[in-house]
Image (cartoon, helix red, strand yellow):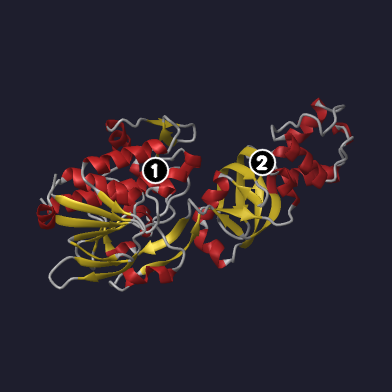
């Protein structure tokens, strides 16, 4: 057991934030250099809270992509920075790291990777075991108020429970929704890219489609009218509007533009992505010939959820008793427009409070990607979402957290040997 006097002689790494990036850095720094005194300061009453709730409680650890050039395309912000960091710790390394500690990951059809247990507790237990094994300490309900650079070297960290000194300091506290909340970092000379929400759902108050809440469609294409923003993927209809991977990806890529529009804009949805308004016409004609005496409302030919099909027919003005042979040209054209380019108004957003992701943060030009150390304040490091890096949904934000956390751990551990 380490005595108090021995601990005082150790170089100290203080980590602000007990989330994925901070914890991963802590356990690896302590493992790589047992002479380090590693302390985590967490402002809330829980560690790894976002890990716990992510992926519906399963924890989407990473994404099954093993090509750096391809993976960085999933990050609306920070791709060039990540090209350099991913060369040091990448998807394969994440999978192996957890496997070596008894946590096997599995790949789902869309590339997302989860623990085989389908429980985020497996990830939490693994990290906590490592922390205990290598003597990492953490203090809950310790909010950092201010950081001061000491005259000789290191930092003085002012918390809600007093002051602590650090030889090395990692900021891994996640993103903030307001620029003013970064003041304790701008006081050190760092610049902030204004934070705005990313990964949010679209609100459609009073739109009748919300009556179909709970219905999901496997593949749609959504475009934001008047922009170049377009995304494809699964869609979920909710009681407030639409959600699902297609919407979340679109919100990430359009984070700043949609903020500038005050989250009021128009979209088109193609419910049958294998067709457009031109190519679907001969398909409709073929259906009319093959099913002439069948009622249109029965057994829709595009494999859409039945309630959605009935909703589209109602909007097109198609009588529920009409047969395909009875379909007038005017109503047919309306149906084609609704299938391939249904227009809807969006007015507002809903964010996932527990999984809140921001676009914005510390300017990447002020960070060395080889070490994740500040170019302004020596021995000040940044990892995770506090940086101006964010990915779409699918495990990409966690991969950035593991990567940046590991780089800091290796850098600090090497310096303190």
Q: Residues within 10 Å of mark 1 (few under 14, many from 20)?
A: few
Point 42% across, 36% down: residue: 113
Residue 370 seen anywhere in this rendered image of the structure: no
Q: Is residue 42 left or right of residue 292?
A: left
Point 31% across, 52% down: residue: 22
Q: Is residue 156 left or right of residue 205?
A: left
Q: Earlier in the sequence, mark 1 or mark 2?
A: 1
Q: Where's the N terminus, which quadrant?
A: top left
Depth order, front residue of 81/186:
186
Q: Position of residue 161 (x, y in %)?
A: 31, 64
The numbered mark at residue 70 is 1
**Tag 1's secondary structure?**
helix
Q: In this rendering, is residue 358 above or below 331?
A: below
- Which residue, given by chain and number where applicable, does mark 2 sit on? 214
Residue 265 seen anywhere in this rendered image of the structure: yes
| Disc 1 to disc 2: CB gap under 8 Å | no
Q: In this rendering, is residue 311 above or below 22?
A: above
Depth order, front residue of 12/326:
12
Q: Position of residue 66 (x, y in %)?
A: 35, 37
What is the quadrant of residue 11 in the picture?
bottom left
**Tag 2's secondary structure?**
loop
Point 35% across, 30% down: residue: 104
Q: Is residue 414 left or right of residue 169?
A: left
Depth order, front residue of 68/349:
349
Q: Residues within 10 Å of mark 2 (few under 14, many from 20)?
A: few
The numbered mark at residue 2 is none
Q: Is residue 247 left or right of residue 192?
A: right
Point 38% across, 48% down: residue: 48
């Amino acid at each position: 057991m380490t005595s108090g006097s021995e601990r005082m002689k150790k170089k100290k790494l203080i980590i602000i934030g007990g989330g994925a990036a901070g914890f991963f850095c802590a356990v690896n720094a302590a493992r790589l250099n047992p002479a380090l005194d590693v302390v985590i300061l967490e402002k809330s009453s829980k560690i790894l809270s976002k890990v716990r709730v992510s992926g519906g409680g399963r924890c989407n650890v990473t994404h099954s992509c093993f090509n750096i050039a391809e993976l960085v395309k999933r990050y609306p912000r920070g791709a060039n920075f990540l090209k350099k960091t991913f060369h040091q710790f990448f998807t394969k390394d994440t999978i192996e790291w957890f496997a070596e500690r008894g946590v096997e990951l599995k790949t789902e059809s869309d590339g997302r990777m989860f623990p085989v247990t389908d429980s985020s507790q497996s990830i939490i237990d693994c990290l906590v075991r490592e922390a205990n094994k290598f003597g990492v300490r953490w203090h809950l309900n310790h909010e950092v108020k201010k950081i001061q650079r000491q005259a000789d070297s290191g930092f003085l960290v002012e918390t809600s429970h007093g002051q602590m000194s650090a030889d090395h300091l990692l900021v891994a506290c996640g993103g903030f929704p307001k620029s003013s909340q970064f003041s304790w970092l701008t006081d050190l000379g760092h610049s902030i890219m204004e934070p705005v929400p990313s990964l949010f759902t679209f609100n459609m108050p009073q739109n009748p489609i919300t009556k179909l809440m709970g219905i999901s469609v496997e593949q749609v294409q959504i475009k934001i009218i008047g922009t170049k923003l377009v995304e494809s993927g699964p869609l979920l209809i909710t009681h407030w509007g639409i959600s699902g991977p297609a919407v979340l990806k679109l919100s990430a890529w359009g984070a700043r533009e949609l903020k500038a529009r005050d989250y009021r804009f128009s979209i088109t949805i193609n419910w049958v992505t294998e067709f457009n308004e031109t190519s679907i016409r001969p398909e409709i004609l073929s259906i009319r010939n093959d099913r002439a005496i069948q009622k249109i409302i029965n057994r829709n030919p595009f494999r859409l959820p039945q309630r959605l099909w009935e909703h589209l027919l109602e909007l097109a003005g198609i009588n529920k008793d009409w047969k395909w042979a009875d379909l007038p040209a005017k109503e047919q054209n309306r149906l084609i427009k609704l299938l391939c380019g249904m227009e809807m108004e969006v007015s507002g957003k809903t964010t996932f409070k527990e999984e809140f992701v921001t676009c914005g943060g510390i300017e990447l030009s002020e960070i060395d990607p080889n070490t994740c150390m500040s170019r302004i304040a020596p021995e000040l490091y940044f990892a995770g979402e506090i940086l101006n890096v964010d990915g779409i949904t699918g495990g990409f934000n966690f991969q950035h957290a593991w990567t940046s956390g590991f780089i800091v751990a290796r850098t600090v551990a090497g310096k303190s040997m």
